[in-house]
């Protein structure tokens, strides 16, 4: 600021008078403190700095990405390997993986095969991710959730 205003405890009226004389605003920083903490500054600049800080914090938080892989109850070996490679790639990128077996028509009688397939996938991806949810049958879909291991 450059002006010689002493830092200290002022009454509300005196603080407002100082702010007006400097052509700045009196901004309440923490209203719950006793006495409340205020600063004399430019309010628009204060809002800008606050938004900038919130944006920086938001950018640092990690976003959870969920990738899905679909199998049939009688998926052959080549298709399984192909989809397993995609699953490995997703887990290496840090995304959660939801693998599911979709039962069409009467194929629901092969639900044991679907469960075996999902458990086999979980076992094959054991070093890259951990099982967050064991295979669950929801209607005509059996799914498993695998999250990546922390590095």
Image (spheres, rainbow, N blue to C red):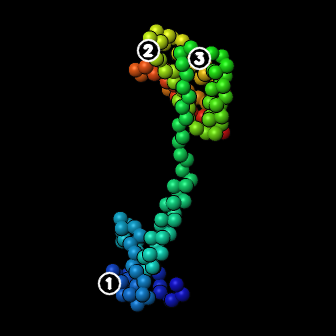
**SS assignment at label 3:** loop
x then y, percent, for residue 20: 38, 87
Neighbours of disc 1 within 10 Å: few (<14), some (14-19), many (20+): few
**Comparing labels 3 and 2, the label whose residue is closer to the camera:** 2
Toward the viewer: 69 or 13? 69
Quote the CA–CA distance across marks 1 and 2.
78 Å
Quadrant location of the C terminus in the rendered image? top right
Residue indicated by mark 1: 13
Q: Secondary structure at mark 1?
A: helix
The residue lying toward the viewer, choosing from 127 and 113, is: 113
The residue singled out by tag 2 in the image is 105
Q: Secondary structure at mark 2?
A: helix
What residue is shown at x 33% (from left), y 80% (from top)?
Answer: 12
31 vs 74, left or right, is: left
Residue on which disc 3 sits: 75
- Where residue 93 appears, as percent x and y from the top left, is 64, 39
Residue occupying the point 67% across, 22% down:
81
Q: Is residue 81 above or below residue 49?
A: above
Q: Is residue 92 visible?
A: yes
């Amino acid at each position: 600021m450059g002006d010689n205003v002493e830092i200290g405890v002022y009454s509300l009226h005196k603080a407002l008078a100082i702010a007006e004389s400097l052509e700045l605003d009196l901004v309440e920083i923490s209203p719950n403190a006793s006495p409340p903490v205020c600063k004399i500054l430019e309010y628009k600049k204060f809002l800008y700095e606050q938004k900038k800080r919130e944006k920086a914090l938001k950018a640092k938080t990690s976003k959870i990405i969920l990738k899905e892989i679909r199998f049939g109850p009688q998926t052959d070996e080549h298709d399984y390997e192909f989809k397993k490679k995609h699953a490995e790639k997703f887990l290496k990128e840090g995304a959660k993986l939801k693998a599911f077996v979709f039962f069409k028509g009467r194929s629901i009688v092969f639900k044991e095969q679907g469960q075996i397939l999902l458990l086999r996938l979980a076992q094959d991806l054991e070093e890259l991710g951990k099982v967050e949810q064991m295979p669950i049958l929801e209607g005509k879909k059996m799914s498993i959730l695998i999250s990546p291991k922390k590095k």
